[in-house]
Amino acid sequence: MKPAPFAWCAPTTIDEALDLLARHGEAAKILAGGQTLGPLLNMRLASPSILIDINGITELAGLKADAAGLTIGALTRQSRLEDDPEIAALQPLIALAVPHIAHRTIRNRGTVGGSLAHADPAAEWPALVTLLGAQLLARSKVRGMRLIDAEAFFITHLTTVLAPDELLCEVRLPPSPPGAGYAMLEFARRHGDFALAGAMVRLTADSRGRLGDPRLVLFGTGRRATRARRAEAMLAGAVPSPDLYAAAAATAASEIDPYDDLHASAEYRRHLAEVLAGRALEQASFRMNGNCDD
């Protein structure tokens, strides 16, 4: 199939892009990597009257690390993060998650901001920024800039709080806590497919060996990535043990609202979520304080 007719503009600055969004609003679509938008256009599931190609806006790409954390430009390609040796030290969860995103050829073009704005609940980036407590910087010609907490950014399947005239510009990640252990596990029918279920975990422990500020996010199991708050409360302040992790995984699985589709039943997704959460908790626990299981 071929896309419906559309106009094409290629701004070279953020201000130019914001001006176009302000003028065209919902009739416009942003073209970044195009790995999702391209097929949607070809199948006419999206029919914008104008495409705003932001690939020439160099200020939207790149990484910046400082005492405040890691800032990722929205136009940064997935493979840039995969290939940067500093990422594994600065944000270990990114290094664990990015290789699971589709295939290398897609990661070469796909962008961080594009994945977040698309908001597929089975994608890795929405879960990742939710777990890490990221803030997302959006800009509008009329309202200026606003920082949005990642957990508040996603509303439901393929829907975010971005207004039609807003452009997602940056992802701001706080520093990784010292000694944190991370894990990311997902299950897909084939390598490169979206996950039927996935779990991301971050654990830290105090000097007494008790868990502090545990984070557990499940994805691919509902209309958005879900922080398992009750499971996190069960873990906080507790002494790590296999029984604790099994109980927390079961609690996490009870907090999601999975759905049936052609690929899996809701019951199967809930079972997968519990198994993956339990295994991820065990892995993250082992990796705390620099342990390596490679």
Image (cartoon, rainbow, N blue to C red):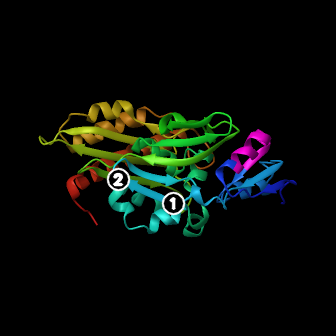
Residue 107, percent across and down? 56, 64
Q: Can residue 271 be seen in this view?
A: no
Q: Residues within 10 Å of mark 2 (few under 14, many from 20)?
A: many
Amino acid type of disc 2?
A: Ala
Q: Which mark is residue 172?
A: none
Q: Residue at x 57, y 48 (%)?
A: 169
- Based on the picture, tell me whether residue 34 belongs to the magenta stretch: no
Spatial CA distance of label 1 from label 2 is 25 Å
Q: Which quadrant is the C terminus positioned in? A: bottom left
Residue 19, percent across and down? 73, 44
Closer to us: 117 or 281: 117
Q: Is residue 285 left or right of residue 171?
A: left
Which secondary structure class fits the magenta region best? helix
Residue 14, percent across and down? 65, 50
Give the label, 1 or 2, closer to the camera. 1
Task: Tell me the residue that label 1 is attached to.
Answer: 62
* Picture quadrant where residue 261 is located: top right
Q: Is residue 285 left or right of residue 30?
A: left
In the displayed orientation, state which residue is furthest to the left. Answer: 208
Q: Is residue 237 left or right of residue 88?
A: left
Q: In this view, does 51 lie above or below 253?
A: below
Task: Tell me the residue that label 2 is attached to.
Answer: 183
Q: Which quadrant is the N terminus positioned in? A: bottom right
Residue 113, percent across and down? 57, 51
Q: Is mark 2 on a helix, strand or loop?
A: strand
The magenta region covers 16-29
